[in-house]
Image (cartoon, grey):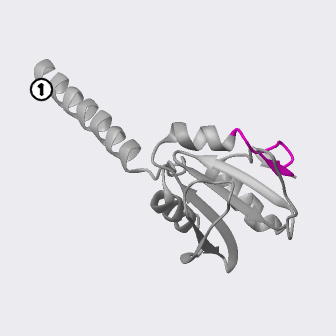
Amino acid sequence: MKYKTLSVLLLVSALTVSGCGKAATSAPSAQPLAVEDKASFIASLQASNATAEIGDTVIQDFFTPEGNIIKVNRLDVQVFEYETAEVMEAEASQVAPDGGSVGTSMMMWVDTPHFYKAGRIIVLYLGSDQAILDLLEQVLGPQFAGQ
């Protein structure tokens, strides 16, 4: 009788522990998706319930790669994707903390500049829409330059 009771207790304990493990692994992740490139940036925006559509190309003389306009909730965000994170970091280091200049070029922005970076991309948003600013910070972290 003792062995039967002990066997039942061990079985119940094993099922409880294995059930807890499954519940923990099936819970949704609270961590945002890691952004490494343009595709993962778009996926992260969409996972945050934002609309994100690739638009026209954009060229900024102070960044090496040709960029893309991403329509984020119908507002333009510029994304520049680099071959390596090191090259991206080198170009990002040329942006003044207030975004007023890049390297030796002084900027005359059409709206308030906000620069973000993650993985191999630099993201530039010119505007002041607080919902977009909050979304970009959620997906990319705090801006590294701008106002």
Q: Is residue 27 magenta?
A: no
Tell me which residue sits at (78%, 56%) in the image.
114
Q: Is residue 91 above or below residue 38?
A: above
Q: Is residue 101 magenta?
A: yes
What secondary structure is found at the residue carrying circle 1? helix
Residue 146 in the image, given as x and y percentages of width and height:
82, 51
Q: Is residue 88 above or below residue 50?
A: above
Front-most of residues 94 and 34: 94
Tell me which residue sits at (62%, 38%) in the image.
90
Residue 46 in the image, given as x and y percentages of width and height:
53, 68
Tell me which residue sits at (82%, 65%) in the image.
130
- Which residue bears the numbered disc 1? 4
> Residue 62 is drawn in which quadrant?
bottom right
Residue 134 in the image, given as x and y percentages of width and height:
75, 59
Tell me which residue sits at (68%, 59%) in the image.
61
Q: Which residues are magenta?
A: 93-102
Question: Which amino acid type corresponds to the residue marked 1 in the rendered image?
Answer: Lys
> Residue 2 is drawn in which quadrant?
top left
Front-most of residues 111 and 1: 111
Evaluate whether residue 146 shows in this view: no
Q: Main secondary structure of the magenta part?
A: loop
Front-most of residues 19 and 56: 56
- 142 left or right, relative to 68: right
Front-most of residues 63 and 30: 63
Quadrant location of the N terminus?
A: top left
Residue 84 in the image, given as x and y percentages of width and height:
47, 42
